[in-house]
Amino acid sequence: MIDEKTDGTALPEHGLPAEQVLDEIRALRAADRPTHGGTLFAYVYDPAVPGLDELAATAHAASVHVNGLDPTAFPSLLAMENALVGAAARLLGGGPGSAAPDVVGSVTSGGTESLILAVKAARDARPHITAPRLVVPSSGHAAFAKAAHYLRVALDVVPVSPETLRPDPAAVAAAIGPDTVLVACSAPSYAHGVIDPVAEIAEAAAAAGVRCHVDACFGGWTLPYLRRLGAPVPPFDFTVPGVTSISVDLHKYAYAPKGVSVLLQRDPALRAPQYFAYADWPGYTMVNPTIASTRSGGPIAAAYATVRHLGDDGYLRLAAVTRDAVAGLADAVRGVPGLRLVAEPESTVVCFTSTDPGLDLFVLVDELTVRGWHTQPQLTYADLPASVHLTVTAAVAPRVAEFGPALADAVAAARAAGPTDLPPELLALAGTLTPDSLTPDLVAGLAAGLGLGGAGGDAPAGPLPGRMAPVNTLLDAAPPALRERLLVEFVGLLQRPHW
């Protein structure tokens, strides 16, 4: 823990020995979810390849002080970025001899930055449109909404079918108007792991003269390998004529450390408005392809080392291992009465829900956590039920046989515990409150009742509650706008200095 002789911040009066500081970090890390071992189904991507962590860490350290701000000063970083972009382009249907021979790209800090830049490039390519709009399925990643918010682009959301979890291409086409600057789709969608009808959506966008971005942050590095293994993966990349840009995260299924993503544009002219350049000041002329100006070379070097070490054959092997793990987990879900798959797996996601009114999914998530399995609950949305999301990586494969019995045991425990029992008046309040009606006292009272730390005035932020079912139940009862405000307030209570 942090040394109590300090003021509780990171800046002590006198510097501490290196080993003491590392001990503090190790103690703090002990409270985190396990990033290795195949029991965490979100946030991290573990291939379980011996020595890969050490290789990536060494490469990261070798370039951590290199600055991507000026590629002429650090050509090593420029070379590694170009190599990563080239690898992603070839994987996704671009490069010499393809239908998209002039693909170019940029290395970003993650999928959210890639999506923001895709929206920026599309918006800035049509400066005469004073009220630009973005068409996106409701299953599109929340980062599209973030991009729209940051860039003042209106968001036109097309619902997805409760049965297929995909948007109707005709509905997407109908949503495209004269002020639309970009149409987006997913390969696959994060929540459920299904691939949108990219070819039809891209065709509609091209017919309207509008760019089409494919968010393949989640699947871009693994779907091509799954296709090579025989999976019926539909066209989603630059082999589709109307696709103008694609994002793919290397810190997902390329298994690079965070945070590295690649944004590909079909040709240099499409990428040009992505840049920011500024010379009207007395300092250096700024020109950036990404949001950040200064960028550490560490993550890029780590990604380069990872991709070079694993190689094409290594990724094919990891995809096969992951495919088999997905199949085993899906079978485990099918084998438990009261559960059903939300969608048949098409990629590396297993998503399931409850068909039993007596089985509270949020209690089930907590029971799985108690048993060492860390899953991701997803709240009710429109006609889509609450669900449990499993992001499956190669590291999960050795643990698949254990998951089925653990899931059945957790379901039995959740049924015995019964649904989360929140006061009816609290649930009613969640259904009627508006975001603007939340006062600090009301937020503090709700947080205290849910066991969230830091809820009492000047009290320091405490640990998260041992069980999250009450929090998730309250959020599930609230409409999306209120969920957003509650989460902002709750997280704000946790993210405060320890004075």
Image (tube, grey):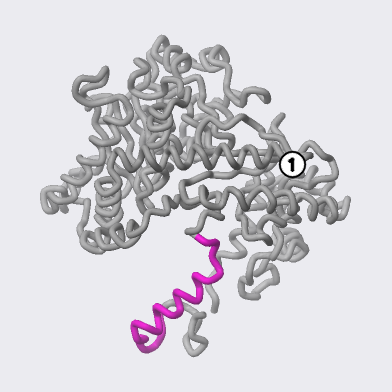
Q: Is residue 108 left or right of residue 193?
A: left
What are the residue bounds of the magenta stretch? 11-34
Query: What's the residue at 77%, 44% (across, down)?
Result: 477
Q: Which residue is mark 1?
A: 336
Q: Is residue 347 left or right of residue 85?
A: right
Q: Is residue 195 left or right of residue 95?
A: right
Write down the quadrant of residue 250 in the picture. top left
Could you tell me residue 399's position as x and y percent?
A: 56, 52
Q: Which image quarter is the C terminus in? A: bottom right
Residue 248 drawn above or below residue 182: below
Write down the quadrant of residue 65 in the picture. bottom left
Whether residue 27 is in magenta: the answer is yes
Write down the quadrant of residue 103 in the picture. top left
Residue 86 drawn above or below residue 93: below
Could you tell me residue 342's position as x and y percent?
A: 66, 33
Q: What is the three-letter code of the residue carrying label 1?
A: Val
Could you tell me residue 198's position as x and y percent?
A: 46, 20
Q: Is residue 481 left or right of residue 146?
A: right
Query: What's the residue at 21%, 41% (across, down)?
Result: 83
Could you tell me residue 494's position as x and y percent?
A: 60, 65
Could you classify mark 1 by the number of other residues whose Cα lies within 10 Å: few (under 14), some (14-19), or many (20 or more)? some
Taking depth in this image into account, of 205 and 132 the one nearest to the observer is 205
Taking depth in this image into account, of 283 and 107 the one nearest to the observer is 107
Helix, strand or loop at disc 1?
loop
Residue 191 drawn above or below residue 43: above
Query: What's the residue at 45%, 38% (across, down)?
Result: 218
